[in-house]
Image (spheres, grey):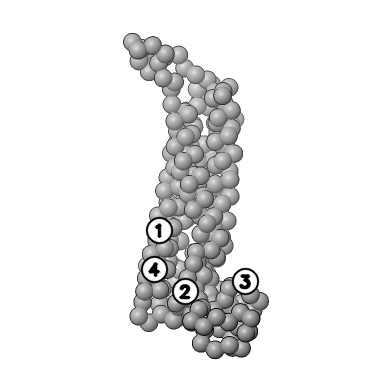
Amino acid sequence: MHKRTKIKIAIFVLLVGMACMFTAVVTDHWAVLSPRVEKVNETCEAAHFGLWRLCKKYIYISSENFAEGLGCGPISLPGEENCTYFRHFTPGQDAEIFEYKTQKEYNISAAAISIFSLAFMIFGSLCLIGSCTGKGKGRDYLLKPAGMFFAFAGLCSFISLEVMRQSVKRMIESEETIWIEYYYAWSFACACTGFILLFLTGIALLVLSMPQMPRNPWETCMDAEPEQAE
């Protein structure tokens, strides 16, 4: 397969990865939390949240949906929903908004790291645009920083995922918690997909931008003829 074709495939995969990561950052279905439901024909309060806001959903549990000892839900059942932004960077208000004893530091860290991931994606995209519009050696040269930026974006995505996972874990294990069940939802899956695509394809793009290997054992990489990605 021609080198330029491989680069085009890598760029397409990167676009998919960026779309997944952007979707994860702006949505609030990273995790779903459910309290215990003791009685039938009552309204229970489930919650789902992301990096920026918490949504509470009041769900009526009928006899058809009731199972003794299980949590409120599923979250897809109809009910009134109320969403509130965390106001991460406004001191003194998080405790009032996030009343479920979530560790404030975890959410701030996950949100800040996700911003770094988006910044790296923007820088990588600018390098790709310069590579696509450039000519000669400059075209291949810009692929190197582009690959590095996308790999860094993938690493930031992974760190944000782990921080959010630890946040949910601390919340569930707290003695004061009301939640008995939790699961990671589709926003979390989008972030996982974005991490895999961005990191692996960024590394692949970096490898593709390297000089070709020497054809003969006595050649060095500097002696090998440059391979232009036309």
- Mark 3 Cα within 10 Å, few/some/many (few <14, many 20+)? few
- Which one is earlier in the sequence, the residue at label 3 or at label 2? 3
Q: Residue at x 63, y 75 (%)?
A: 77
| Of pointers 2 and 1, the one earlier in the residue sequence | 1
Mark 3–mark 2 Cα distance, whole angstroms, equals 15 Å
Cα–Cα gap, marks 2 and 1: 19 Å
Q: Looking at the image, can residue 109 be seen?
A: no
Reply above or below: 174 against 212.
below
- Disc 4: CA contacts within 10 A as few (<14), some (14-19) or many (>=20): few
Other residues around mark 2 within 10 Å, as few (<14) / some (14–19) / many (≥20) = some
Of mark 3 and mark 1, the one earlier in the sequence is 3
Q: Are marks 4 and 2 in contact (CB under 8 Å)?
A: no
164 vs 120: above or below: below
Q: Which residue is mark 2?
A: 181
Please give the label number shown on residue 162.
1
Numbered mark located on residue 169 in the image: 4
Q: Residue 76, which numbered label?
A: 3
Amino acid type of disc 3? Ser
Label 1, secondary structure: give it: helix
CB under 8 Å between discs 1 and 4: no
Residue 132 image offset from top left, x and y in percent: 58, 31
Q: Amino acid at mark 1?
A: Glu
Q: In this view of the protein, which residue sits in the foreground, 92 or 69? A: 69
Q: CA distance from mark 1 to mark 4?
A: 10 Å
SS under mark 3: loop
Numbered disc 2: secondary structure:
strand
Amino acid at pointer 2: Glu
Compare marks 4 and 2 and give the one earlier in the sequence.
4
